[in-house]
Image: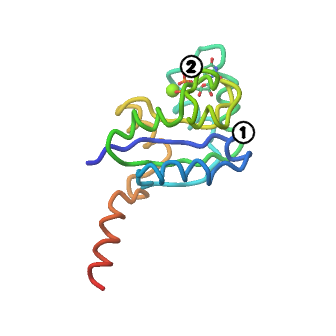
Amino acid sequence: MAERTFVAIKPDGVKRNLIGKIITRFEEKGYKIIGLKLLIPTTEMAASHYAEHEGKPFYPRLIKYLTSGPIVAMVVQGPNVIAESRRMMGATKPENAEAGTIRFEYAICQEYNIIHGSDSPESAEREIAIYFKEEELCPNWNTMLEVIMDAK
Ligand code: UDP
Ligand code: MG
């Protein structure tokens, strides 16, 4: 199976009308979006998503933030997509993010930093399962399109 990761445009990104710009970056880079939905995460989903941060001082605000409005949840597929999409996002703190990265371009604070991406294969599979059923994903749409075009 090709490598896949979970990416979310957080509520501040949606509110600021950055959905198109952010999705475009992944498309233009060459990655395939194989799962996509707009939803307001429940407290349970947010708690599960950020379980590793439970007990940290910023955790309660983080849960409030993630459940404050719709997010765009995505599964993105392609070679080395877990590490590479994190690189495209830039450092958690926008002031440490490399120029040209999503957080450098669109965020000014560490707390509201626009985007989330899984940090390992284990987190990717765990996070995908919080937001998607396997049958909601379209991992082969590229091949499907080729088959249709070949048949013409
Ligand atoms: N966060 C925060 N304060 C901190 C560290 C993190 O509010 O001191 C928030 C921020 O939105 C961040 C999220 O918690 O994106 C998860 O933190 P993590 O360290 O996992 O960063 P990420 O993986 O998102 O770069
Ligand atoms: Mg993280």
Q: Cα distance, mark 2 to mark 1?
A: 18 Å
Residue for badge 2: 54
Residue 66: x %, y % from top left: 65, 36
Q: Nearer the viewer, residue 71 or 110?
A: 110
Q: Is residue 60 left or right of residue 147?
A: right
Q: Which residue is mark 1?
A: 68
Q: Quadrant of residue 61?
A: top right
Q: Residue at x 58, y 37 (%)?
A: 102
Determine the residue positioned at 27% across, 83% down.
Answer: 151
Q: Secondary structure at mark 2?
A: loop
Answer yes or no: disc 2 within 8 Å of ligand 1. no
- Dot placed on the residue nearer the N-terminal end, 2 or 1: 2
Q: Quadrant of residue 149?
A: bottom left
Assess disc 1: are there few (<14), some (14-19) or many (≥20) residues with their C-alpha within 10 Å of its C-alpha: some
Q: Quadrant of ligand 1?
A: top right
- Where, quadrant-wise, is the C terminus in this rendering? bottom left
The numbered disc on residue 110 is: none
Q: Residues within 10 Å of mark 2 (few under 14, many from 20)?
A: some
The amino acid sitting under disc 1 is Ser
Q: Residue furthest bottom?
A: 152
Task: Specify the amino acid type for callout 2.
Answer: Glu
Q: Residue at x 38, y 48 (%)?
A: 77
Viewer-nearest residue: 78 or 35: 78
Q: Give the answer, above or below, for where 129 lies relative to 151.
A: above
